[in-house]
Every structure is written in structure tokens, then in C-alpha cells.
Amino acid sequence: MSPTLRHAAAPDAHLDLYVLRPDATPRRVRLYACALLVLAITALVLAGVVDGAWPAPGVLLLFAVPLGLCMNRFVFFPNEVGVTADAAVVLAAIVVFHDGAAWTGPILLALLAGPLDARHWEARAFVRMAYNSGSSALVTLVAVAVFTPVASALGGSPGALLAAALAAALPYVAAESAFGVTLVVLLGESPGTALRHQLPLNAVALPLAGYGALAALAGVELGLGWTLVLLLPVPLAPELLLVELPRRLKRARAPGALAVVGGLVGVGMVTVGGVLVDASPLLVVVVVGLAAIAGWESRVDAAHAVPLLAVAVAVFVVALLPVDAAALAVVGAAVVTAGVAAGHARTGTIVRGLLGALATGLVVAAGVALGLDALAGIVIAGAAAVLVAVPIDGRRPSTVVWSIPLLALAASLGVAARPFDGRGALVAGVVSVGAMVAIATGGVPVWRSRRLARRVPVSGRAPYVVVAGTAVAALAVTAGVWTIADHRMVWSCAAVAIAQTELATALALVRQWRFAPRRRARDATAVVVASLGLALAVPGLVDRAPWSAVVVAAAVAIGALVARPLLRAAAPGARRP
């Protein structure tokens, strides 16, 4: 989806008056549109000089046909923004041109977005054509800048090209949102209103980008004529996805069917992703089962549609599978979690939850594909996904802080299970479920719990046992790393996962029982810093560096010191609020 500056469709009786009406576009908008167009043309010239390759006219014309249809079929909004489906065409062009005119082809195609709009020629709306061409070309430039290195790093296989296209869709949407919000603000709308309006619209560009990449891959394998055939229905997507589908879903008697369909699509994505990386069937079953358990445990509503455990499952899968071609499995696992969690929700909540899970899964996969493949990098990618879910879901930004130990725990278990394929995934999945139960003994978990928060009893013994047991076990396994010759990475990640469970339990105690704002912030900061320190200490544990053992011991001590004064609050027989 691409917000573009448009004219409203006028009634036929007043068409002549409409055409002759002078352009009332503010001067600041005209300057903004012209600046974008100049920058885009400059970027095209520089790309042509540096790259030295220009697209074949026939291939460019092939993509210009669906692009022209997209620019003349749009959903119009009162703030003079129209939404088109050109993201699918642009991403398809990026994939097709990647081994030839990788830069000039997509940028030149995007510059045609303005001139291909017949309505603007009829109204002589040249400023609007300039904005549409300039913004589309610059957004495409950002996408190509991400797609090219990612595709090269992943090897250039069809799965790698699809993963690179999904990774490029994220900055594409971000840049498109930035240009669109700036435009609407210059037209007189408040920044908050513009952001709330455009983020949900731009999020639909993610599945469209994936569809465009699949159409391009089909054309590469079978002939570009198939790409044209697959892209011809794309111009109808804005009307179907933004108007007809929500209208029909509101009339549907069983909105849970949408959640079932979304969950089945997620299962298919996990299966295809597992096949692409030659994973065992047991591993695929474990991933789907863990995602379903996470969704069964998650509670969603109109205010919180994206389950936080969907991000944790995505982090676990991206740490479990090889980096290359694992994007589908990561996104699919998050979608399965959201689909199961939203089985009894309303239609709007289901749609937001599925789209939010899709976006967060893509962020995790893209972060790892861009080089954040170490344990600490995976945690950072997960935190970025939670931050992306904040405007979609309505959560507070502080959710990122409270979720760090949970994400680090999931990443540690995934890395530890990676060498053992399906069997390791099964053990890690069972351990992760046990860790969720352990964390729930300290208080209400950071995720919106549907069952554990009600069924795990709060007693004086359970939190003591969890904190003390995980602290001792983490120190014991850390000491064992110095005596074990094989699989030191596995044992190091196991020690870190156990320590992260202690820290997550301590953070749940802080969130539940610490009420003084300053002490609450101090304790939470100490636990989060200790959690990040553990993630950074894994390479040192593998190399048996003494400082890494000190980091583990310090993190365990911080967790115990933070939890100790709060354990008394969890008195026997206490009930959760």
C-alpha cells in the first residue's frame, strides 16, 4: 500500500468546473513535492553512473502496465490521501532486476508512478504527480539499499530472495510512512492523527510486498509473463482489503473463522520455512505446537490485540533455525500464536492481531538477516519487534523493558537447541513452557496471561523455590562449562537460559509487588542490565573467559537481591488482583 496525493473523484455534472478549478495546494506542499522529485532524479542519475546498467525497455514496460493500473485504482480518504497497491509491483521489480539493473530499474519504474496517473493529467495536477513520483522513487531506493546486501549475504537462492524482499518491505513501509505523515502534516493535519491513520494502512504493504516477491520468483522460474499475470489483480487489493473485507467481516456471524484461517496460513508458512532449511518434521511440529501453546496462554482484546508471546516465539524460532531462508517460519510461528490467541475475539481485534504478529515476525527475521545473529543481537531484534507492536497494539513503550528477560530466555533456548534439530527443539520447547510457569509464580507475567495468571498459585514457597533453584542451577551449569569438552555453546546457553528465568521471575516480582516509583525503576533497570549482560557473556563462556563467569554470578546475585525483599509479599494464600 502506498499513500499518494490525489484529487477526489468529482461528479460528472461538475467535471468541467472541477478540471478548471485552480490548484489550491499550499506552497509548502509544492516545495516539498518538488524537493522529493529532485532528490529522486538525482538518485537515479547517480545510480546510473555508479551501476552503469539500465533496465531493458521491454521488462520496464511489463511492470509499467500493472503499476499504471494501480495508480488509477485507489481508495480515497478525506485528507487527500489515496492508497494504492504499487508496493507489490515495486517489490516484484526489485526481485527481477536484482541481477541486472538492480538500482536503476526499480527507481526508474517508481518514477513512473506520477505520470501513469490519468486523473492527474486530466486535472493538470503536476504537483501531485511530482510528489507521487518522488516519494515512490525514494522509498524504492531505501528498499533496494536493504534488499541488495541481504540477498547477497543469503546466497541468492529463491528462498533467500524472498527473505530479502520481506526484509526490504520493512524499511519500505517505514520510509513511506515518514513521507506520507510529513505530507499530511503539511496539509494541516496533526502529527498524531496522521500517524494513527497511516500506520494501519501501510502495514498492509507487508503482505502485498510478499505477494509481489512471490510473483517475481514465479516469473524468474517460469517466464516474466507469469509475473504480469499474477500482478494484474493487485490493483484491486486496496478496495478489497480496506473496504470490502472489513465490511463483510462485520456482518459475519463467526469471526473466529478468520482466526482459524490466519492460524492455518501460519502453519503453512512454518512448514514451508522448515522445508527451505531442511529441518526435520519433528522440529516443525514442535514450533507449531509451541506457538499454539503460547496463543492458548495469551489473552487478547480490543486494547491489546497482538500477543507478546508471539514475539517471544518468533525470537525462539529465529534462534533455533539457520539464518538463511528462515523468515517464513519465524513469521508463520508468530501468526499461529496470534491466530490461536484471537479465536474468541472480535473481527477487528483478530485482524489487528494477525497483522501485528506479521509485522513483528518480519522485524525479528529482518534484524537477524541484517547481521544481528548473535544471542544479544537476537534479543535486540526481539525488542525492536515489541517496539513496533506498541503503536499497533496500544501498549506502553515500557513493555519493551519488562520483556527483555523473556526475550533473552527464548533466544538462549533456541540457540542451545540448534545443534540437535528436532530433539533439541522438543527439549527446549518443554523447558520454555516450564519457564513460563516458573515466571508466573512471581506475579502477573508481562504477557497478558489467560490461564497461568489464574491457575498458578501464589504461595510463600513457590517463588522462593524458583528463585533459589534457578540461581543454584545457573551457577552449577556455569561451573560445568569449564569441565565439559563438547557442546560448550549448548551448555553456555543453557546456563544463561536458567539465569534468565531467575531474572524474569525477579522482574515479575518487581512488576507485581514494588510500588514506590523510584525503587521500582531502580530494580527493573538492574534486572534488565543483568539480562543484557548475560546475553553478551555467552561468547566468553564458550571461550571459558573468567570474566564471563563473573558476569553470570553477578547477574544471579542481582536477581536474588532484587527478589529477596519482595518474596515476603507473596504470602501464602495471597490472591492476584
Image (spheres, rainbow, N blue to C red):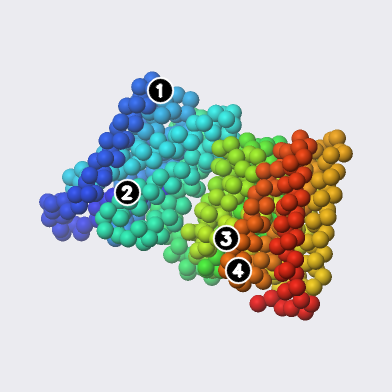
Which numbered disc flags the more N-terminal residue, 3 or 2? 2
Answer yes or no: is residue 74 visible: no
Look at 42% across and 25% down and name the residue there: 101
Badge 3 local density, few (<14 within 10 Å), some, or many (20+)? Answer: some
- Judging by the rendered image, the residue that carries numbered circle 3 is 399
**Which numbered dot is residue 192?**
none
Amino acid tagged 2: Thr
Look at 83% across and 41% down and name the residue there: 481
Name the image quarter holding residue 240.
bottom left
Foreground tag (4 vs 1): 1
- Judging by the rendered image, the residue that carries numbered circle 2 is 4
Look at 27% across and 53% down and name the residue there: 186
Foreground tag (4 vs 2): 2
Badge 2 local density, few (<14 within 10 Å), some, or many (20+)? Answer: many
Amino acid tagged 4: His
Q: Give the alpha-carbon distance from disc 4 to disc 2, as whole Å.
A: 36 Å
Q: In this view, does 98 lie to the left or right of 491?
A: left
Q: Give the alpha-carbon distance from disc 4 to disc 1, as whole Å.
A: 53 Å
Which numbered disc flags the more N-terminal residue, 2 or 1? 2
Mark 4 touches mark 1? (CB < 8 Å):
no
- For label 1, the SS is helix
- Judging by the rendered image, the residue that carries numbered circle 1 is 51
**Which numbered dot is residue 344?**
4
Badge 1 local density, few (<14 within 10 Å), some, or many (20+)? Answer: some
Residue 384 percent location from the top left of the image: 55, 50
Residue 181 percent location from the top left of the image: 35, 53
Look at 41% across and 60% down and name the residue there: 196
Q: Give the alpha-carbon distance from disc 2 to disc 1, as whole Å.
A: 29 Å
Amino acid tagged 1: Asp
In the image shown, does 347 or 487 lie closer to the viewer? 487
Mark 3 touches mark 2? (CB < 8 Å):
no
